[in-house]
Amino acid sequence: MNSRFDLYEKKIKKDKKENVDGNTLSRFLFRVFIKSLLVVILFLGALIYIRQGDDNKANFKKVVYNNSLSFAKIYNLYSKYLGDALPFKNSIKDDTKVVSTEKITYSDIKKENNGYMLTVSKDFTLSALKSGIVVEKKSNEKYGNLIKIQDKEGLEITYGCIDDLEVSLYDYVEKGELLGRTSGKLYLIFEKDGTYLSYEEYL
């Protein structure tokens, strides 16, 4: 009698657990669906805005492509109203990315303009100091290829003197991910909210 009662009790507990698991999965899928739907609506809204006229197209290009994208503001706004920007990120890790845990090693560092010029080894492999999005990519005669990466807290790190760039504009890079290589020199700028910061906290 007791054994039959125990089996019945176990069956009830199992059914409850399956029901809870099913409800959790349903809620998760519903949240993903709603977030995806909002992204599609925003995308279609942007397309409709662009197609309204050449002025709108020029304004959109000016805001999105010509200005520095504020990844931190977008990330925080999205997270505030919609939760984690990528709720299933742990299940879709890209194992093909080259990620390093080594710190930047240098033999000399000097203040230069708003940043710092580091003397590094020949053919130095450069890794991202922080995770974030590439908000700017340009080149000039003095510093060669430069990229600016902004993290979700608003910290912006500019990397200069880079050869063989491995990332593109608006790529999301993880901390330690390969950015490129340098040939003995590396230029870094640290800034947040328009203020240039010292390198000590980040190197």
Image (cartoon, rainbow, N blue to C red):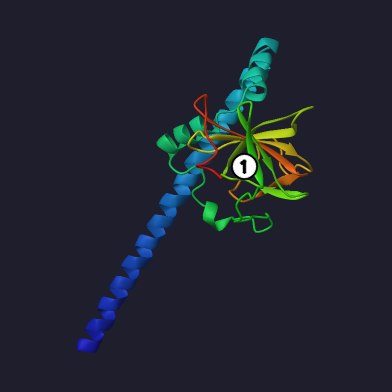
Tell me the quarter of the picture where residue 188 sits.
top right
Q: What is the three-letter code of the residue carrying label 1? A: Tyr
Q: Is the residue 135 above or below the residue 61 in the image?
A: below
Comparing 82 with 160, the one in front is 160
Comparing 188 with 55, the one in front is 188
Q: Is the residue 24 above or below the residue 180 in the image?
A: below
Comparing 140 with 116, the one in front is 116
| Residue in the picture at 59% in, 28% down | 69
Q: Position of residue 160 (x, y in %)?
A: 70, 35
Q: Position of residue 26 (x, y in %)?
A: 43, 53
Q: Position of residue 122 (x, y in %)?
A: 77, 49
Q: What crowding class fits label 1: few (fewer than 14 Cα within 10 Å), some (14-19), or many (20 or more)?
A: some
Q: Is residue 111 left or right of residue 153?
A: right
Q: Is the residue 96 above or below the residue 135 in the image?
A: below
Q: Quadrant of the N terminus?
A: bottom left
User: How many numbered circles does the render carry?
Assistant: 1
Which residue does the numbered mark 1 point to in the structure image?
172
| Residue in the picture at 34% in, 67% down | 17
| Residue in the picture at 67% in, 20% down | 61
Q: Quadrant of the C terminus?
A: top right
Q: Is residue 84 left or right of residue 47?
A: left
Q: Secondary structure at mark 1?
A: strand
Tell me the quarter of the picture where residue 137 sits.
top right
Tell me the quarter of the picture where residue 57 sits.
top right
Q: Position of residue 190 (x, y in %)?
A: 56, 34
Comparing 66 with 157, the one in front is 157
